[in-house]
Image (cartoon, rainbow, N blue to C red):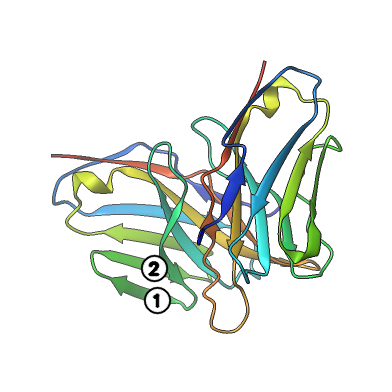
Amino acid sequence: QKEVEQNSGPLSVPEGAIASLNCTYSDRGSQSFFWYRQYSGKSPELIMFIYSNGDKEDGRFTAQLNKASQYVSLLIRDSQPSDSATYLCAVTHNNQAGTALIFGKGTTLSVSS
Amino acid sequence: GAGVSQSPSNKVTEKGKDVELRCDPISGHTALYWYRQSLGQGLEFLIYFQGNSAPDKSGLPSDRFSAERTGGSVSTLTIQRTQQEDSAVYLCASSPRGQGSNGELFFGEGSRLTVL
């Protein structure tokens, strides 16, 4: 069973701080990594994807990937109350049917004003 | 519409009844996924269709669950003899895949199933 592990939280940070969300995965063959944000009662929406080792920045968000350690993280700089949501890490898993996307259970982030 | 459409949005059923949940993906998207999300939990992978390939059914929790995708478009998830633990939001997502795609999934609003 291929797994994606996340700390469920809640992770609480004050407004303006850096929030750090972490994810580990078990399938060494995984090639693509995604971070989705899910507001309460809503469907997930993509915020970042990363394919190569290292950092990828998009505005206040930075995704970091280390394939050797099977670790991917998301940093949110200058956290805002509107960032309060559950963040889901997702990893591709290849099999005979194609490439499925497996999600972790998510980390709940709470940003206090 | 332009997005993934799911129906019904809400379904209340009695234990032991069969239910069908429908997903109409974004036109042209070759990949279609079904996930289940129980209250306060993450997304549990159920089944994945990619084009005309045999589906990846590895996430279906029991033989009471089945899904089909007709003509490479609309998909139906069927749950037979429903149990209370089947109560959850069932999310469908589609993806364009192929060249130029980053693999992003586009989710529908979900079908909330309540088994009494």
| Residue A9 higher or lower than A55, as above or below | above
Give me the residue at 68% from left, 45% from top: B22
How crowded pointer 1 is (Cα within 10 Å; few <14, some 14-19, many 20+) is rated as few
Which amino acid type is shown beneath numbered disc 1? Gly
In which quarter of the view is residue B33 placed? bottom right
Residue A91's disc number = none
Q: Position of residue B68 (x, y in %)?
A: 80, 52
- Contact flag, marks 1 and 2 (Cβ < 8 Å): yes
Which residue lies under the disc numbered 1?
A54
Q: Position of residue B48 (x, y in %)?
A: 72, 57
Real-space Cα separation, disc 1 to disc 2, in angstroms: 6 Å
Residue pointed to by mark 2:
A64
Residue B31 quadrant = bottom right
Q: Residue, x 37% and y 43% (percent of image)?
A: A39
Q: Residue at x 80, y 59 (%)?
A: B70
In the picture shown, does residue A39 fall above or below A99? above
- Label 2: chain? A
Whether residue B61 is visible here, answered yes or no, is: no
Figure disc tally:
2
Chain for numbered disc 1: A
Q: Nearer the viewer, residue B103 or B74?
A: B74
Residue B44 position (above or below residue A62): above
- Classify mark 2: helix, strand or loop: strand
Q: Position of residue B59 (x, y in %)?
A: 74, 47
* Helix, strand or loop for disc 1: strand
Residue type at tag 2: Gln
Which of these two is toward me, B11 or A32?
A: B11
